[in-house]
Image: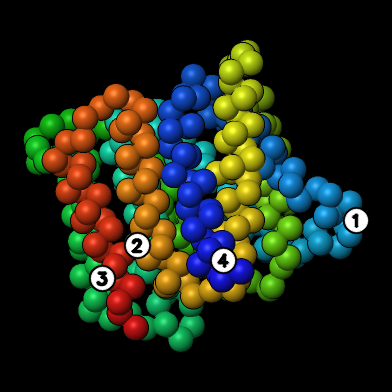
């Protein structure tokens, strides 16, 4: 299958990530992250039971995986609780732009050109518009935008970092998710109050784990291994459009001009950045 099709499969699943996350905001973030990531690791288990060597990877690679899966989703779920969900979601989707802009820094042989800089300015203008809702800086800004920005940086550097470590099988993504999930649950026990989950919560957690926090990771890793990170970066900009539209529709909020303009600016930034060779 063409690498871009793997990427599009992951992107389609990630479109539901923010909506599912908002539906579970009453679940403590470490608990939410832990359960979903462990469920997401399940598809890899049958392959590892047949061949345990697939999870024998260097500690450096495992650390990169935990950094990407654990830190990214924890910060994203924090952001969705402490900032308006639609706007925080848009800030989080600066990560495809970060892939474009940081590729020359992280990957050897990739050069930074003026178009990358222009793309960065466009993207951050879109994020600023989303954060301020077009009202300028006169209003009070929610601190939840900071973890959203941090999540974007983490996912971009994780995605690029997978090209800098020794090659590992895609099934190792299951190990990343399992270790990250167990770490999250440990943090829940130590740092968060106990929570009781209802049947609906478990259904949403299963959807979250098997889709955007499970199968999507395996497809994304396959795409990065086989394809061009810059081409995959531009495809990723379908995600903020689809994710924002779904989030707005399920939240009952109208499409404001500032949200539409912010989405278009962020997507245009990726297009410009990807045209630079």
Left of 68 or right of it: where is 101? left
Q: Residue furthest right?
A: 50
Residue 246 x/y as whole percent: 37, 37
Identify the element where label 1 is drawn. Answer: helix
Q: Position of residue 89 (x, y in %)?
A: 35, 41
Q: Which mark is residue 50?
A: 1
Give the crowd class for mark 3: few <14, some 14-19, many >=20 residues within 10 Å: some
Q: Nearer the viewer, mark 3 or mark 2?
A: 3
How would you rate the neighbour count of disc 4 (Cα within 10 Å): few for under 14, some for 14-19, many for 20 or more? Answer: many
x, y percent for residue 75: 46, 40
Identity of the residue drawn at 30% across and 71% down: 273
Q: Does label 3 or label 2 sit earlier along the sequence? A: 2
Q: Tell me if residue 189 can be seen.
A: yes
Colour approach in the figure: rainbow
Label 1 crowd (10 A; few <14 / some 14-19 / many >=20):
few
Marks 1 and 2, the one that precedes in the sequence: 1
Q: CA distance from mark 3 to mark 2?
A: 10 Å
Q: Which residue is mark 3?
A: 272
Residue drawn at the location 49% of the way across and 83% of the way down: 108
Residue identified by numbered label 4: 223
């Amino acid at each position: 299958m063409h690498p871009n099709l793997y990427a599009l499969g992951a992107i389609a699943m990630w479109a539901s990530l923010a909506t599912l996350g908002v539906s579970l905001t009453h679940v403590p973030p470490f608990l939410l992250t832990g359960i979903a990531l462990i469920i997401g690791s399940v598809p890899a288990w049958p392959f590892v039971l047949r061949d345990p060597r697939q999870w024998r990877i260097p500690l450096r690679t495992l650390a990169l995986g935990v950094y990407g899966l654990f830190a990214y989703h924890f910060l994203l779920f924090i952001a969705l609780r402490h900032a308006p969900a639609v706007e925080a979601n848009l800030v989080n989707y600066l990560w495809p732009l970060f892939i474009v802009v940081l590729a020359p820094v992280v990957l050897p042989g990739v050069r930074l050109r003026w178009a990358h800089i222009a793309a960065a300015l466009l993207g951050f203008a879109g994020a600023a518009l989303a954060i301020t809702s077009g009202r300028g800086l006169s209003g009070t800004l929610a601190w939840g935008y900071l973890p959203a920005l941090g999540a974007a940086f983490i996912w971009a550097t994780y995605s690029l970092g997978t090209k800098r470590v020794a090659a590992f099988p895609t099934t190792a993504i299951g190990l990343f998710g399992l270790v990250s999930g167990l770490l999250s649950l440990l943090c829940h026990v130590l740092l968060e109050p106990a929570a009781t989950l209802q049947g609906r919560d478990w259904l949403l957690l299963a959807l979250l784990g098997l889709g955007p926090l499970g199968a999507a990771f395996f497809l994304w890793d396959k795409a990065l291994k086989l394809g061009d990170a810059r081409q995959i970066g531009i495809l990723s900009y379908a995600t903020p459009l689809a994710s924002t539209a779904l989030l707005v529709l399920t939240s009952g909020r109208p499409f404001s001009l500032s949200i539409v303009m912010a989405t278009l600016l962020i997507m245009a930034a990726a297009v410009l950045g990807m045209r630079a060779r």
